[in-house]
Image (spheres, helix red, strand yellow):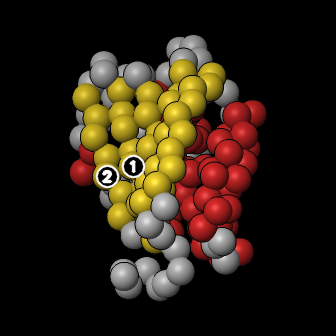
Amino acid sequence: MKNRFDMEFIGISENEAFARTVVAAFTAMLDPTVEELAELKTAVSEAVTNAIVHAYPEESGFVVLSGRIDGNTVYITISDNGIGIADVDKAREPLFTGKPEEERSGLGFSIMESFCDSITVTSGLGEGTVITLEKRFGGSKGEI
């Protein structure tokens, strides 16, 4: 089965739950287990929260949420046109946070990685960030 969606919303904290709901409804056609769905929703929450908190430090901007299903795999992309990430590898290190003054845990990327089969992150300073989450349904992580 192949299906897709694309949407844009204002990057405010209230829309994080909205994004989770959209992804849950979209992936329902794959008949995920409760655990699989919870994992994907948590990963989406982390990615959307990163965009809301880090991409637009001065004022809210837009977050783009896209999804694609191919077979039993869902691909969810969260992107922004914010300030970007200076060092993606450093940002992906556990416990790293770009906002230590806000007592952030720095586990967002680690959580995304633990709940998805793979994630890709591309970013450019002043250009924004794109995170793609890939999750296969109907089997253990890493199985086909």
Badge 1 vs badge 2, beta-carbon distance below 8 Å: yes
Task: Tell me: residue 35, above or below residue 143.
Answer: above
Residue 128, by quadrant, is top left
Residue 80 at what x, y percent from top left?
Answer: 44, 28
What element does badge 1 sit on?
Answer: strand
State the image quarter where residue 27 is shown.
bottom right
Residue 24 in picture, x, y percent from top left = 68, 56
| Amino acid bearing label 1 | Thr
Are there few (<14), some (14-19), or many (20+) residues within 10 Å of tag 1?
Answer: many
Give left or right: position of 60 versus 109. right
Q: Residue at x 63, y 52 (%)?
A: 26
- The disc at residue 47 is none
Q: Nearer the viewer, residue 46 or 38?
A: 38
The quarter of the image holding the C terminus is bottom left
Which residue is tagged 1? Answer: 132
Q: Residues within 10 Å of mark 2 (few under 14, many from 20)?
A: few
Q: Secondary structure at mark 2?
A: strand
Mark 1 vs mark 2: which is more N-terminal? 2
Q: CA distance from mark 1 to mark 2?
A: 5 Å
Position in image of residue 138 (x %, y %): 53, 80
Of residues 107 and 123, which is closer to you in this image? 123
Q: Position of residue 54 (x, y in %)?
A: 48, 32
Q: Residue at x 43, y 80 (%)?
A: 141
Q: Residue at x 57, y 30 (%)?
A: 7
Residue at x 67%, y 77% (from the top left corner): 33
Q: Is residue 129 left or right of residue 14?
A: left
Which residue has dot 2 on it? 120
Q: Amino acid at mark 2?
A: Thr
